[in-house]
Amino acid sequence: MDMTVSPAMSSTTLDELRALISSKFGLDQTALSADKPLAEYGLDSLGLVELLFSIEDHFAIRIPEERANIDNLQQLAALVDDILKTQA
């Protein structure tokens, strides 16, 4: 599945994800680039799992394990938007 998304499509989702990451991991929202690998912010595999659980709670969605392999915020926002669309 193509996980690219136009910036306008998920800007709200992207903003919510930035706020969530900032709150959970103490990172500056303005420093979170949409296309920078999450690992570069210090999120290891355990941190990513914690983030995914927080995202599931925040958006009231379930992220299937087979779709949880994401590298950056843009991919994550696209995934959340896609799941929200299918659950609507």
Image: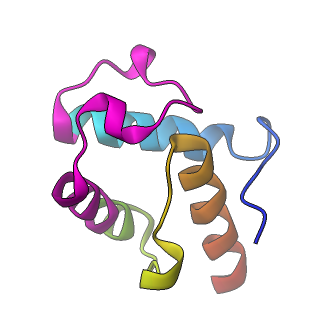
**Any magenta on residue 40?**
yes
| Range drawn in magenta | 24-53
| Dominant SS in magenta | helix
Residue 42 image offset from top left, x and y in percent: 23, 34
Quadrant of residue 23 within the rendered picture: top left
Quadrant of residue 55 within the rendered picture: bottom left
Q: How is the image coloured?
A: rainbow
Residue 66 image offset from top left, x and y in percent: 50, 83
In this picture, residue 44 sits left or right of residue 76 = left
The residue lying at 44 percent from left, 65 percent from top is 59
Residue 35 image offset from top left, x and y in percent: 59, 32
Q: Quadrant of the N terminus?
A: bottom right
The residue lying at 37 percent from left, 34 percent from top is 19
Q: Quadrant of the C terminus?
A: bottom right
Q: How many marks?
A: 0
In the rendered view, tell whether residue 28 sits above or below residue 22. above
Is 39 or 88 nearer to us in this picture? Answer: 39
Is 42 or 82 nearer to us in this picture? Answer: 42
The residue lying at 57 percent from left, 63 percent from top is 80
In this picture, residue 22 sits left or right of residue 7 = left
In the rendered view, tell whether residue 61 sits above or below residue 37. below
Is 57 or 70 nearer to us in this picture? Answer: 70
In the rendered view, tell whether residue 72 sits above or below residue 85. above
**Any magenta on residue 26?**
yes
The residue lying at 50 percent from left, 58 percent from top is 70
Is 72 or 52 nearer to us in this picture? Answer: 72
Residue 15 image offset from top left, x and y in percent: 52, 35
